[in-house]
Image: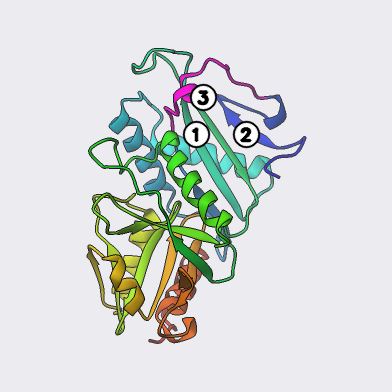
Amino acid sequence: MYYTNDTIIFHNGSYVKAKEASTDLYAQSLHYGYGVFEGIRAYQTVNGVKIFKAEEHYERLKRSCALVGIPFHYSVEELEQISYQVLRKNNFSDAYIRPLVYCSPNMSLTSPKEVYLMICAWEWGKYLGDQNLRLCISSYQRPNPKSIRIEAKVSGHYVNSILATSEAKQRGFDEALMLDMEGNVAEGPGANFFLEKDGVLFTPSLGHILPGITRHTVLQICKELDIPVFEKKIKPEELAEADGAFYCGTAAEVVGIESIEGKPFAKSWKNTHGPIIQEAYKNLVLEKSFSHVLI
């Protein structure tokens, strides 16, 4: 699904076939989840193949490394150049790019002596599909921000996400909605959350969530389109009174939410701001103007 016999990746300074790449089974990242990664998308835009917000993603990758004590010395410019090379070598235009920083063999709970870089890409549709989602409230909370670096995109953190998504699917839902340790709405296992009420959008404030790059992009779109949006703590009880909601993330892009715990929203998706933002985001990543979008 992710690679073929001919797929090329960047691995520790060289471009190699994915099927020929290997790693050490004693790697600290494998045993303890001590590594960081990013999810980035490239699009065939009107101006050629472009990686959307590459600089912001690679700045976050470097920041994630710094936050958890993983030494990493590639520059943002080098990482961007490598990513475009991976796309060219695989003849990809619309693709998902996965950089992974992982650590050398080390069975002690200390920072690594050596760090490795892998960058791969594959053609991938929207992570959560094109249909509006049926969510459930997860029994798994987002981690306590005093126990981990919640703002870092760390590999091991995503065990929490796997548990939440697996539980949701076992219950017959499409995806989960997770609360924080204080019982407020936080985010999805791999996407940020926006709620609409009376023409105003609300999104959980920072502190207990990953500061998503797509989340920030949606905030910028709302500003440009004069859609009022506020960051605040959202109580679960507010979900029942909402007019609509959507998830956003690099892999998911912007996807509508149909219902939460089987309860649909007060308005249909087409009568909320969601489709407007969805279309504006699509135009933005394709480098098209979205000035024609009317509210």
Please name the amino acid that badge 3 sits on: Leu
Q: CA distance from mark 3 to mark 2?
A: 19 Å
| Dots 1, 3 in contact, CB < 8 A | no
Residue under numbered circle 1: 100
Residue under numbered circle 3: 30
Q: Is tag 1's residue or tag 3's residue first in the polypeptide sequence?
A: 3
Q: Nearer the viewer, residue 275 or 15?
A: 275
Q: Is tag 2's residue or tag 1's residue first in the polypeptide sequence?
A: 2
On the image, the x and y values in percent for residue 147 come to: 26, 35
Q: CA distance from mark 1 to mark 3?
A: 12 Å
Question: Which secondary structure, mark 3?
Answer: helix
Q: In the figure, residue 245 lies in which quadrant?
A: bottom left
Question: Which secondary structure, mark 1?
Answer: strand
Q: Is tag 3's residue or tag 2's residue first in the polypeptide sequence?
A: 2
Most common SS among magenta residues: loop
- Mark 2 or 1: in front is 1
For disc 2, the neighbor class at 10 Å (few under 14, some 14 to 19, many from 20) is many
Q: CA distance from mark 2 to mark 1?
A: 11 Å
Please name the amino acid that badge 2 sits on: Ile
Instruction: Name the residue at 43% across, 29% down.
Output: 35
- Extent of the magenta region: 21-36
Is residue 24 shown in magenta?
yes
For disc 3, the neighbor class at 10 Å (few under 14, some 14 to 19, many from 20) is some
Residue under numbered circle 2: 9
